[in-house]
Amino acid sequence: MAFDGFFTHAMVVELNQLLASGRVMRVNQPYPNEMIMVIRAHRKNQRLLISVNPAYPRFQLTTIPYQNPAVPSNFTMTMRKYLEGAILTKIEQIENDRVVTFRFTTRDELGDAKDLVLYVEIMARHSNATLVNQDTGKVIDALKHVGSDQNRFRTILPGSTWRMPPKQERTNPYLPNSKYPALVKACSDSDDLAHQLQTNYQGLSTNLAKEMASRLLTSDNLPQTYTEFLRAFEQPDPTLVEFVNGKQDFWALTPQGTQVDKTTKFGTLSALLDHFYAHKAEHDRTKELAGQVLKIVNTEIKKDQRKIKKLQKELAAADQADFYRIRGEILTTYLGQVKAGATKITLPNFYDKNRPLDIELSPELSPSRNAQRYFTRYNKLKASIEYDHEQLRLTQAELDYLTGIVSQIAVAAPKDVQEIKVELVEQGYIKPRHQKGKKQRKVPAAKPSEYYASDGTLIMVGKNNRQNDRLSFKIANKNDLWLHVKDIPGSHVVIRDAKPSKQTITEAAQIAAYFSKGQNSTHVQVDYLPAKALHKPSGAKPGFVTFRGQTTLTVDPVAPSSINPKNQ
């Protein structure tokens, strides 16, 4: 079932039991479409995740770690100002819709009591979280701002009047009603009944409507079956369902009328969602965070590619330098034979068996000035060749660096993208965000990821250039084995053992190939050598090293989890 009205109902029941009367300790916005409130309730800190991601909108408690951006957003600062220290009094669902209110009480600067309401709407691309002053009905701030150009009838901007989303013309199933007996009587087909239930009642997703229809059609006591179905969401039974086709879904109750291949139980709905969304949300968060970074990097890559083409054309044109040098030298040698005012002269070419060579002259210049003119053109072209070769070297180095960044993002987690962004700020590709009155603090590189070979040997992997530098030159011991894919961008990998087994070296090489641009290739070559043989040239880009004396082996990329279950 999707995060529909019934799942929302069950989640509200769960969160009220765990969070009601809790105090907001901290508010963070680790990702653009998500906020996390740390709430102290029942002597325990709980992390409430509110996501308005169009693909995975939800609210739940989460234990999945996250990394905050170096500079908090304006939305984060506003939420901290109004909500930190506030008491969460109640969580309520609007009828059986996917709109929920988190009600807070707090005190303003003068010590007066103030009531605030956080409206959370779980509606795909229209999902939002909006903090409203209950006394004035004015919007304080929202995760997503909606201007009049987007919605003329319902703007959501700081200072605007709060308006509820349009109400559905459907029946709240938790209110007394007598619709369902007539619907069951009129429909003999399960799919038809499921469609009618969705049309007439709030909060029914397609799969849940089919489950409800199946139970009602096979019931001997419709009122009892209907009531038991509703009560199931008062005491939810968190269940991960796996269908025959391999697809998974999360349910707040155990399916009875739906054919499934396997079910897995969880202690809470939040634990169920953490498990279900762990990889999906992680990938989406990475893509969301990487969007801005990739746009900047790809723009720079295109600039470098254009510059390289231009430099190559200039170098091709500079091949004519000898054309001018030869003519200058021949004119100088036979200067006495050149007549003033001549426009052309034919002289022996001692560079080509003294064959005659026609040389163009400027009649207004003297013979010696004509010779000097050819030498001047030659010297300019020679200087431009040296300059163009140096620019070509620098531009190609930058292109290799930026291509490596793109490869790192392809295998990055959200925290790694944050660090890549910090690196690009330090390198001048992204302008830093300065807060007035605050000094920009330097963010240290995160600790490299740790994995284990099948024999338990520690293998450390840098997920970005800052981690790579830290791993190779700060963390690695001089006799630790260092690995990197050959001639393509990839992570620095260190085996925490001076004399690892051949199997461990192979597994580390497989991991190095997995965290590289060759992840989807086969027969990837990986170099390895002791870390003490590494050298970083002065002024080199982050992650760049030189070495020699390496050994090379060929492997296929393998995910760390396939090498050792501890690497999950």
Image (tube, rainbow, N blue to C red):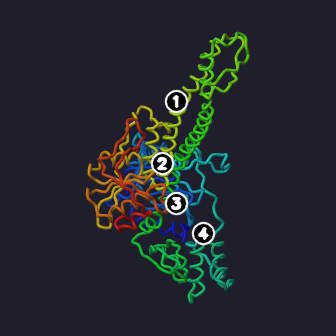
Q: Are marks 4 and 2 in contact (CB under 8 Å)?
A: no
> In the image, residue 505 lies at what x, y percent?
33, 61
Q: Disc number at residue 202?
A: 4
Give the camera-side residue of 139 and 484: 484
Image height of 82 relative to 310, above or below? below
Q: In the rendered structure, which disc, 4 or 2, sits on the residue that comes first in sequence?
A: 4
Q: Earlier in the sequence, mark 4 or mark 1?
A: 4
Judged by depth in the image, the label closer to the viewer, 2 or 1, is 1
| Distance from Cα at disc 1 to Cα at disc 3 | 67 Å
Q: Which residue is mark 2?
A: 404
Looking at the rendered image, the quarter that the N terminus falls into is: bottom right
Image location (x, y in percent) of residue 45: 34, 57
Helix, strand or loop under label 4: loop
Q: Gap in Å between the C-alphas at discs 4 and 1?
A: 74 Å
Cα separation between marks 2 and 1: 27 Å
* Residue ID for mark 3: 100
- Tell me if mark 3 has few (under 14), some (14-19) or many (20+) residues whose alpha carbon lies within 10 angstroms of its own: many
Q: Nearer the viewer, residue 207 or 198?
A: 207
Q: Earlier in the sequence, mark 3 or mark 2?
A: 3
Identify the secondary structure beneath mark 1: helix
**Which residue was labeled with disc 1?**
386
Indicate the amino acid at tag 2: Gly
